[in-house]
Image (cartoon, rainbow, N blue to C red):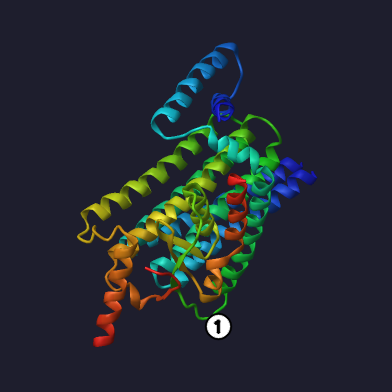
């Protein structure tokens, strides 16, 4: 009983994160800003929902497979957002209208 | 690594029988040989993990705390109408020698909500941030301090 | 009893996720940039993968989680390959170096100042 409530709380938090990503997707006006929220949904939302499902099933083969999926998301979702951001930065001609450039480096 | 590959095979199969176990042992050995021969994997990464187990645990806990802190900041930006966002593109250098640790740093920056690594070239990083408060102090964040300690452990 | 309530809760969550999929679908159609569309497709694949995991846990079947895993891998690979193909077809493929990228950004800034 307690396990079910805990799992429901985790799933509710994850779905909340995903809906927030949708709201942010329509609130911000530029792709790179939308991407920040979308990446949040990919990592935090999916991982929270999967953790909730793992708590519900207990320890068996299904939860082990779900755990493999959590690890996959932890590794793959940064790579996805990095590729998208790189594509947009290189392809867009007037990116400087959208963000300011600050440099602390020595190139 | 070999044990992880075998475990992955057993999890994907869903049950343990003798045939599956024999196939798994043979296939994992083949994949491990392939990784060492062509993908430049070597057992020194396992030595690195064994030496730094405590620091890796601390790193994961810090990473999760940072993810939650940044997520709350992003939530405020999304739901409040008053705060205007100011996106920034930050260029900075880090002085970490090991290539693997720089890869870990880039992935940690990207997985934190609100910051995305756009490009990495040797030790020059280019990071896009949703707001200037998220980009503040990114060139000496807590990740870099922890990774530097780990790098000291490799040599010493 | 508790199981029944839990299953109803999961069905409510499935309906909510369906609304989210429709929202991203609209974004896929109207998205002004290329990256907009790819981002929406990526998010749709994540949400559909969560669908399949929900159904697998509700049914208690083992093999349905495999389908979800394969779906996640396919979404990841499609995003990476589409981005690579788009960059290959784009004219500014030379800017794959960070120094070049920064130089390009600073050039645009200088032109703005001159104007």
Looking at the image, which is closer to me, B53 or B108?
B53
Q: Which residue is mark 1?
A: B82
x, y percent for residue A81: 43, 56
**For the residue labelled by badge 1, is the local secondary structure a helix, a strand or a loop?**
loop
Residue at the farthest top position: B18
Residue B3 lies, in percent from the top left, at 59, 26
Disc 1 crowd, CA 10 A, few/some/many (<14, 14-19, 20+): few
- The residue sitting at 31% across, 60% down in the picture is C34
| Image x and y of residue C10, in percent | 63, 47
Residue B76, by quadrant, is bottom right
As drawn, the residue found furthest toward the front would be B156
Total numbered labels placed on residues in the image: 1
| Residue C53, quarter of the rendered image | top right
Question: Position of B14 compared to C97: left or right?
Answer: right
Which residue is at the far right?
A2
Residue depicted at x 23% and y 59%: C94
- Residue C61 quadrant: top right
On screen, residue B81 above or below A12: below
State the image coordinates of residue B104 (x, y, percent, origin top left): 52, 51
Q: Eyeballing the image, is B40 above or below B73?
A: above
Q: In which quadrant will I find the C terminus of chain C?
A: bottom left
């Amino acid at each position: 009983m307690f396990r079910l409530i805990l799992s429901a709380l985790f799933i509710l938090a994850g779905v909340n994160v995903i809906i927030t990503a949708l709201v942010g997707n329509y609130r911000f006006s530029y792709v790179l800003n939308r991407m920040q929220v979308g990446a949040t949904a990919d990592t935090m939302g999916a991982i929270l929902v999967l953790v909730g499902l793992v708590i519900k099933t207990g320890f068996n083969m299904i939860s082990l497979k779900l755990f493999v999926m959590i690890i996959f998301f932890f590794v793959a979702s940064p790579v996805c957002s990095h590729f998208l951001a790189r594509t947009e930065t290189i392809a867009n001609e007037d990116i400087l209208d959208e963000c300011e450039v600050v440099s602390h480096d020595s190139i | 690594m070999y044990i992880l590959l075998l475990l992955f095979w057993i999890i994907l199969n869903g049950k343990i029988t003798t045939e599956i176990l024999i196939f798994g042992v043979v296939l994992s050995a083949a994949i491990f040989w392939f990784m060492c021969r062509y993908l430049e994997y070597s057992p020194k990464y396992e030595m690195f993990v064994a030496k730094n187990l405590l620091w890796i645990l601390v790193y994961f806990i810090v990473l999760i705390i940072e993810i939650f802190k940044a997520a709350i900041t992003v939530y405020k930006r999304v739901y409040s109408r008053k705060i205007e966002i100011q996106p920034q593109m930050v260029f900075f250098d880090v002085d970490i020698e090991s290539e693997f640790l720089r890869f870990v740093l880039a992935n940690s920056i990207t997985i934190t909500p609100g910051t995305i690594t756009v490009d990495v070239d040797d030790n020059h990083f280019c990071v896009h941030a949703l707001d200037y408060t998220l980009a503040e102090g990114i060139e000496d964040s807590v990740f870099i301090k922890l990774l530097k300690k780990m790098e000291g452990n490799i040599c010493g | 009893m508790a199981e029944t309530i839990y299953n109803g809760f999961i069905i409510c969550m499935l309906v909510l996720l369906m609304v989210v999929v429709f929202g991203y679908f609209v974004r896929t159609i109207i998205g002004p940039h290329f990256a907009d569309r790819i981002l929406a497709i990526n998010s749709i694949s994540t949400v559909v993968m969560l669908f399949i995991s929900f159904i697998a846990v509700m049914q208690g079947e083992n093999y349905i989680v495999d389908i979800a895993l394969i779906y996640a891998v396919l979404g990841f690979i499609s995003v990476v390959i589409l981005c690579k193909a788009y960059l290959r077809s784009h004219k500014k493929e030379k800017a794959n170096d960070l120094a070049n990228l920064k130089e390009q950004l600073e050039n645009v800034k200088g032109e703005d100042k001159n104007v």
